[in-house]
Amino acid sequence: MLQTICEDFQAANYEPIVPVDCRFGSEFTGRKVPVNSARDVVSVLRRLAKEANCILIIAPETGGCLLQCLDWMQDFKGKLLNPGYEFTKLASDKNSLQEFLDQQQVPVPSGGKFPDWLMDNRWSCAQQYVLKPSDGCGGENLKLIKSPIDVEFQSLPAAASWRVEEFAEGIATSVSVIGSACFAPLILPPLRQAFDREPIGRFARCVADLSGEISRRATELASKTVRVLPNPVGFFGVDMVIGIRDVVIEVNPRITLSYCCLRQIVEFNLAARMVDSFSSSAEFSQIQPV
């Protein structure tokens, strides 16, 4: 994904400058800035942020990683192509997000904190449930269960908290959005999500093969979700299931792997559109994603 994003920035005449962990090889178009140790990360990011016209942070929500990066960039938040801190904080906690969306009358699966919600006699053995970390991403550590006794508590990976919700049957769909303070949000074409196993698993790829009716319903649900989110700017994604009941599963407060599929089917440069949405008045001679 990093390679495709850098290519798009360069195609739009912007220079990508990316910090790279010296222990790992990274192939991408653009200038690499070495990071020699963990203690150097903040200083390198802040030095580059001072030079940059705009900043794009790519990091997972897991363990507060994305929030930590945004916190480091608070002095440069006016340059961010990401959603803001409060948006990201809400979307990074699936329990808080789903409660918020439910209050805003956006359809979500019934669920709550694990194990409290299931232990409250609201579960049925006839129903399947999804157990997942409240701050997870990419479909990691998802479990399909039928009751609390299906869960081996000692075997659960470490997480700040867990969420359990009714399994929603239907087509797993992702809708990416480029939000702006200057323009109406750009709702990008819906994509079908494919996983490494069915019915749930790790995210594998997005596929552009949805019918017109499914795409219409997904776009409507994404638009309804965007309208209630706090300050929906930057590139983010709305994951949902389109089925008997269309429901929002989560909001990804960052650029996602769907970018790689979207850039093949839209007729414009997504990276350039992010910059255009960031500011309608400023002139940018270069952009340096961090």
Image (tube, helix red, strand yellow):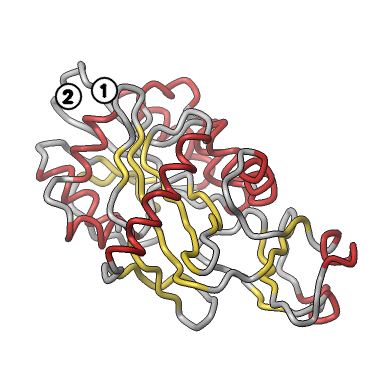
Q: Secondary structure at mark 1?
A: loop
Q: How much space separates mark 2 and mark 1, taking CA atoms?
A: 10 Å
Q: Residue visible at 67% across and 40% down?
A: 103
Q: Residue visible at 17% across and 48% down?
A: 8
Left or right for 176, reference 109: left
Choose between 66 and 36: the one closer to the eye: 66
Left or right for 137, reference 265: right
Left or right for 61, reference 278: right
Q: Is there CB contact under 8 Å for labels 2 and 1?
A: yes
Q: Residue visible at 77% across and 76% down?
A: 155
The count of marks equals 2
Outermost residue, top side: 281
Q: Name the residue tied to disc 2.
A: 284
The answer to which quarter of the image holds residue 146 is bottom right
Rate crowding at label 2 as few (under 14), some (14 to 19) or many (20 or more) other CA atoms within 10 Å.
few
Which is closer to the viewer, label 2 or label 1?
1
Give the residue type that dot 1 points to. Answer: Ser
**Marks 2 and 1, the one that precedes in the sequence:** 1
Measured as percent of width and height from the top left, residue 33 is found at 30, 43
Residue 96 tag number = none
Q: Name the residue tied to disc 1.
A: 279
The answer to which quarter of the image holds residue 120 is bottom right
Rate crowding at label 1 as few (under 14), some (14 to 19) or many (20 or more) other CA atoms within 10 Å.
some
Q: Residue visible at 52% across and 44% down?
A: 66
Give the residue type that dot 2 points to. Answer: Phe
Measured as percent of width and height from the top left, residue 160 is found at 73, 53
